[in-house]
Structure formats: C-alpha cells, structure tokens
Amino acid sequence: MTDWWAAGTGIASAAATISATGLALWVAVRDGRLRDAERRDQEAAQARLVTRSRGPNDRLRITNHSALPIMRLNVRAEVHEADGAVRHLAIHSRRHQWWHGPVLAGGASVDLPVSHRMDQPGSTLIASPLKTGETITVTMQVLDAQGLWWERENDHPPVRLL
C-alpha cells in the first residue's frame, strides 16, 4: 500500500508542476501581448490626433491636435462612385494623387482646396453635393515626431506603415 501511495503522490506532484508551468507560461504570453498592445497604442497616440474636417470656404482642413510637430504629411482624396469606380481628386491645384505637405507644428492646421477632377483645379469638392451612392475618402500619411509613418483613412484608427 505504501508503494501505491508514493506513486500517487509522485503523479499528483508532477501534474501540479506541469499545471503551474503551463499557467506561468500563459500569464507570461498574455502579459507580453498586453504590453505590446499598450506600446502600439502609445506609438499611435500622435497619429490619432491628426484629423480632417471641413475648413473655411469649403476647404479640406487637416489639424494636428497634438503638442508635437508632424514631420511629414501626405494627403489624398478620392470619390468612390456607386458603380465601384474611384476618382482621385486634385488637392491644392496639383495634378498628383498625393499632396505632400511641410512640417505641421503642434496645434496647427492646414486648409487645402480640393478639386472635383484632376483636370479642373480650383473648384471645391466639399461644397458640391455628391451623387447618390458616392462617398469621399480622405487618406492621410503622417510621419510623427518619433519617426514612425502612419496611414489614416477618414476617422478610422491609424495603421502603422513599415
């Protein structure tokens, strides 16, 4: 009977050790994932504070609500038509898909005129009614003060560009 008792306690001890090791491993992995998520959230904090809105004279306003400067800003505007076609819009009288801006200081804004079509600079997009089923997408690429590139579409959370 003593041999069975010793064998049973040995098996129970081994099972408890394996369970404790598994639990410790699970806690370590979970904590690592939480730390990574918190780090990514902190990294994206400045990019989340760059917003787009309607500015004066129906211009596209890009605002840096953070205290730190945005080192580089690229902006693209598109109209997505009901049939799935995408029409790129000219920003600031340029015939390129992307508008490349200078450093945007903390708390500063830039107002950009947006054209209906690439070949018609000057007319404002936001003042004109969209056709049924059309939507506007504004995409911003931001180089933050830490040197990280982010892309933000409309009011969606920023996505890190690698």
Image (cartoon, grey):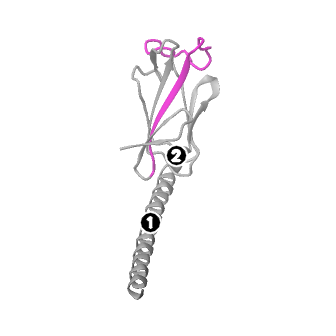
Disc 2/disc 1 C-alpha distance (Å): 40 Å
Residue corresponding to mark 2: 105
**Quarter of the figure that contains the C terminus:** top left
Q: Quadrant of residue 65?
A: top right
Residue 16 placement (x, y as % from top left) = 45, 74
Instruction: Look at mark 1 in the image and give the residue it sits on.
Output: 28
Is residue 128 shown in magenta?
A: yes
Residue at the spot 45% in from the left edge and 17% down from the top edge:
86
Residue plotted at (62% across, 29% down): 55
Q: Nearer the viewer, residue 36 or 60?
A: 36
Q: Residues within 10 Å of mark 2 (few under 14, many from 20)?
A: some
Report the magenta residues as a range.
116-145
Q: Which residue appears at 42% of the width and 79% of the height? A: 8
Q: Position of residue 142 (x, y in %)?
A: 45, 41
Q: Could you tell me which residue is drawn at 47 percent across and 57 percent down? A: 39
- Of badges 2 and 1, nearer the viewer stands 1
